[in-house]
Image (spheres, helix red, strand yellow):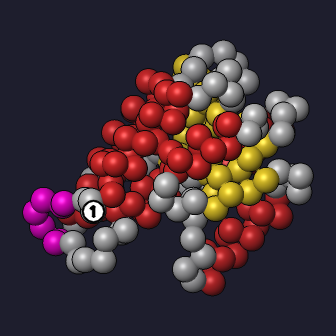
Amino acid sequence: MTRTLVLGGARSGKSLFAERLAAQSGQTVACIATARAQDSEMAERIERHRQRRDPQWQTVEEPIALGAAIAREEDAGRLVLVDCLTVWLSNLLFAGAHDFPEIGRIEPPDCFARERAALLQAVDDMRGDLVLVSNEVGLGIVPMGAVSRWFVDEAGRLNQALAERCDRVVFVAAGLPLVLKGPPC
C-alpha cells in the first residue's frame, strides 16, 4: 500500500504525472474526478482529462462526498486516483448557497467539516494504493478578499494533513517531479 500526494501549481504537469504513476502500477485504476462542468471552459478541461486517461480506467465523478467515494473504490481493489483536491475544496466552500463577505470571517458550509473529516479518515483507512492530486496555492502573494484567503489557508491545511498521512509526497513544477517525502517514483 502506497499513499502518494502529488502537489503542483496550475499547469505544472501534476495531473499527468499522477496519471503516469497510476498507469505504471499495473493495477486496475479508478479515477475520482471532482470537477463539475458548470461552464463551457470547464467542460473542455474535463474532456481533455478524459481523453488523456486510459479508457479501461473507471471514472467516478464525485464533487462533494470524496471520502465515501474513495472508500467504495478502494473496497473494489483498485488503485484510486483523485484529481483534484483543490477543486473539491472549492466545491465544499460553495456548497452552501450564500454570499461571502469581502472582509471578515468566513463561515464554511455545514458539510465542510464533515466531508473534510471523511476524506482524512478514508486516507487513514486506505489499504490499497492511493494517488491524490492537489494544487499548491500558497506560493504566491496573500490574495485580496476574505474568501480567497480562506481558500488558500484551507488548501494549505488540507495539503499538510494529507502530506502527514501519505507515504510519498511529490512536488511537480514544469512537468518535473521533486520527491519531498518517501521513496523515489
Residue 25 placement (x, y as % from top left): 82, 30
Tell me the quadrant of the picture where the N terminus can be found.
top right
Q: Can residue 24 be seen in this view?
A: no
For badge 1, the amino acid type reads Pro
Q: Taking 66 as reference, is 137 left or right?
A: left
Q: Taking 110 as reference, is 79 left or right?
A: right
Which image quadrant for residue 149?
bottom left
- Residue at the far bottom: name it: 40
Q: Nearer the viewer, residue 141 or 123?
A: 123
Residue 81 placement (x, y as % from top left): 68, 43
Vertical arrangement, residue 88 with respect to residue 170, above or below: below
Q: Is residue 29 visible?
A: yes
Residue 113 placement (x, y as % from top left): 30, 48
Q: Which of 156 and 12 is in front in this view?
A: 156
Indicate the secondary structure of the residue bearing disc 1. Answer: loop
Residue at left 39%, top 32%? 160
Residue 65 placement (x, y as % from top left): 49, 55
**Residue at numbered disc 1:** 109
Residue range of the region highlighted in magenta in the rendering: 101-107
Residue at left 49%, top 27%? 124
Tell me the quadrant of the picture where the C terminus can be found.
top right
Which image quadrant for residue 107?
bottom left
Majority secondary structure of magenta residues: loop
Q: Is residue 102 magenta?
A: yes
Residue at left 71%, top 50%? 31
Mark 1 crowd level (few <14, some 14–19, many ≥20, 10 Å Cα): some
